[in-house]
């Protein structure tokens, strides 16, 4: 999962302002979507300026460095990207090429590309690009295949290139491209990955999430529609183009459960907060708990816990404290000992937990690598009973659309019964939100959602390669 952002600032090119500080401010609001690396590209319409580095967005940018960057990153138009790579392991196998925005040339002019999602079955496009002279730097990067396909296309107009390339991409994606004085956004035909557009008096923004609009006072206009290309020029939105007629809306429900910030407007303008609050109320009816305290596992569980506790009339307490390092356990590199990471990330508070029957609140349960350690930490801190409530249904199928759960063997609920999971977690009770309850909590009809990791109904045919 990654965060994409593009800003076209119509006032900036009059020399008074640059787009760079806006990209820094708004980019920090999509940092939760990827903490492995980040990058910014700015342009004055002719020249491109680029900064990319590993780590969380803005990490290590001292005042002095920020000044240096402000001098270097000129222009009125730009992209920012936050990376969560599912193909490389940060620190083990360095992949500076996979840090975005990616930059290449099309018809002698530079373009930059931000990409979020996962695209597979790319061998056809890859072969074509090689035949046209592209030398691939990565064996696995879907981003590079997209970039290479644009750069080597025989078309002369970039929109025509996209109309040619996008139908060949199988999977889910949101793209933001900077070319000349334009920012171009495009979304997969089922609208699985999010992308929305906003504006203020200074110009237009494209972003994975509308929470990035707030710092610059921009208003949410709408989502980029499934199968749509939207072109933003110096005077505003220039055109909307459909790159396919075969569209549907199957928005990723996991954005509402875990990824998106609660204040972001997503599918149909609903906020992720709406889901988290409603799921709490539904869980209180479906699976109440006999506990003294409700405790949110910090990170994803806070809003669920709030609604669940107030509906049941049980006190909500902070019994687990988060290390300020703020590692999102789910986002730790694959292969890392997630249980050990949890001990670094969370610290139980004995004064709250000792002698109490507690109920831990989790947004989802993917691998069962973290929950046993969290429960053990609570028992060590003196909890009399530990109960767990999970505010999504059991995840039984892999995701091929860009969320890091790509094999069935790693999914707890695909391989163990509910009772086996409870036993292995070492807790007194465990309940998930029901599948139906989860859909009701979205406020959307079932046919508007991708639910594939819960029910195996994939909106886009899964990969064969
Ligand atoms: Fe989201 Fe699950 Fe669909 Fe993947 S399979 S896009 S995580 S709902």
Image (cartoon, helix red, strand yellow):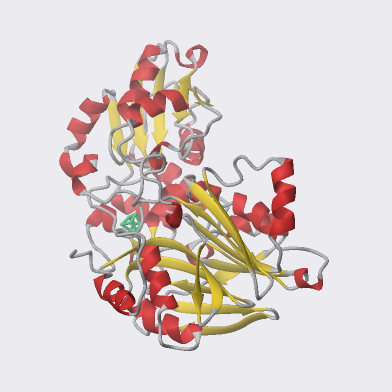
Q: Nearer the viewer, residue 396 or 85?
A: 85
Q: Quarter of the image holding residue 198?
A: bottom right
Query: Residue 188: in sight, yes or no?
Result: no
At 41% from the left and 87% from the top, the residue drawn is 154
The residue under the point 53% across, 64% down is: 269
The residue at the point 38 percent across, 84 percent down is 164
Which residue is nearer to you in this view: 438 or 417?
A: 417
Quadrant of the rendering where the C terminus is positioned: bottom left
- Judged left or right of residue 417, residue 10 is right
Quarter residue 235 falls in:
bottom right
Number of disc labels: 0
Residue 353 in the image, given as x and y percentages of width and height: 45, 16
Rendered location of residue 3, percent (x, y) = 50, 56
Judge whether 54 appears above or below 70 on screen.
above
Quick check: 150 left or right of 454? right
Vertical side of 70 occupied by 394: above or below? above
Kindly tell me whether residue 44 is visible in this rendering. yes
Residue at far right of view: 16
Quadrant position of residue 247: bottom left
Q: Give percent across and percent down for residue 133.
A: 35, 76
Q: Compared with residue 98, is residue 235 higher up or lower down, i.e. above or below?
A: below
Residue 270: horizontal and vertical position, in percent?
Answer: 52, 60
Q: Quadrant of ligand 1?
A: bottom left
């Amino acid at each position: 999962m990654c965060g994409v952002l593009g800003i076209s600032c119509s006032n900036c090119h009059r020399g008074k302002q640059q787009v760079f500080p806006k990209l820094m401010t708004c980019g920090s609001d999509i940092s939760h979507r990827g903490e492995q690396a980040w990058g910014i590209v700015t342009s004055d319409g002719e020249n491109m300026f680029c900064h990319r580095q590993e780590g969380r967005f803005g990490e290590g940018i001292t005042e002095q460095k920020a000044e240096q960057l402000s001098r270097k990153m000129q222009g009125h138009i730009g992209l920012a990207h936050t990376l969560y790579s599912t193909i490389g392991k940060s620190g083990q196998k360095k992949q500076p090429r996979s840090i975005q925005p990616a930059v290449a040339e099309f018809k002698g002019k530079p373009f930059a590309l931000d990409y979020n999602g996962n695209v597979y079955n790319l061998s056809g496009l890859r072969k074509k690009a090689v035949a046209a002279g592209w030398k691939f730097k990565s064996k696995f990067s879907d981003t590079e295949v997209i970039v290479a396909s644009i750069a080597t296309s025989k078309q002369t107009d970039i929109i025509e290139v996209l109309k040619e390339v996008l139908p060949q991409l199988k999977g889910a994606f949101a793209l933001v491209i900077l070319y000349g004085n334009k920012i171009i956004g495009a979304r997969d035909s089922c609208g699985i990955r999010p992308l929305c557009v906003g504006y203020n008096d200074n110009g237009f923004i494209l972003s994975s999430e509308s929470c990035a609009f707030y710092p610059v006072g921009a208003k949410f206009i709408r989502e980029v529609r499934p199968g749509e290309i939207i072109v933003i020029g110096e005077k505003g939105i220039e055109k909307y183009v459909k790159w396919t007629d075969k569209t549907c809306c199957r928005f990723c429900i996991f954005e509402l459960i875990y990824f998106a910030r609660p204040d972001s407007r997503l599918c149909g303008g609903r906020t992720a907060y709406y889901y988290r609050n409603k799921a709490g109320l539904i869980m209180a009816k479906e699976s109440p708990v006999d506990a003294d305290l409700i405790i949110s596992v910090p990170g994803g569980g806070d809003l669920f816990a709030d609604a669940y506790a107030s509906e049941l009339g049980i006190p909500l307490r902070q019994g687990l404290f988060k290390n300020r390092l703020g590692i999102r356990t789910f986002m730790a590199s694959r292969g890392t000992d997630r249980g050990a990471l949890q001990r670094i990330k969370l610290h139980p508070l004995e004064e709250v937990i000792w002698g109490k029957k507690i109920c831990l609140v989790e947004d989802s349960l993917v691998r069962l690598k973290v929950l046993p350690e969290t429960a053990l930490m609570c028992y060590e801190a003196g909890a009399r009973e530990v109960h767990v409530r999970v505010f999504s249904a059991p995840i039984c199928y892999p995701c091929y659309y860009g969320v890091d759960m790509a094999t069935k063997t790693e999914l707890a609920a695909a391989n163990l019964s509910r009772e086996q999971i409870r036993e292995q977690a070492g807790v007194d009770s465990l309940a998930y939100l029901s599948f139906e309850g989860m859909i009701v909590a979205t406020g959307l009809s079932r046919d508007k959602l991708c639910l594939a990791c819960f029910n195996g109904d994939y909106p886009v045919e899964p990969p064969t390669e």
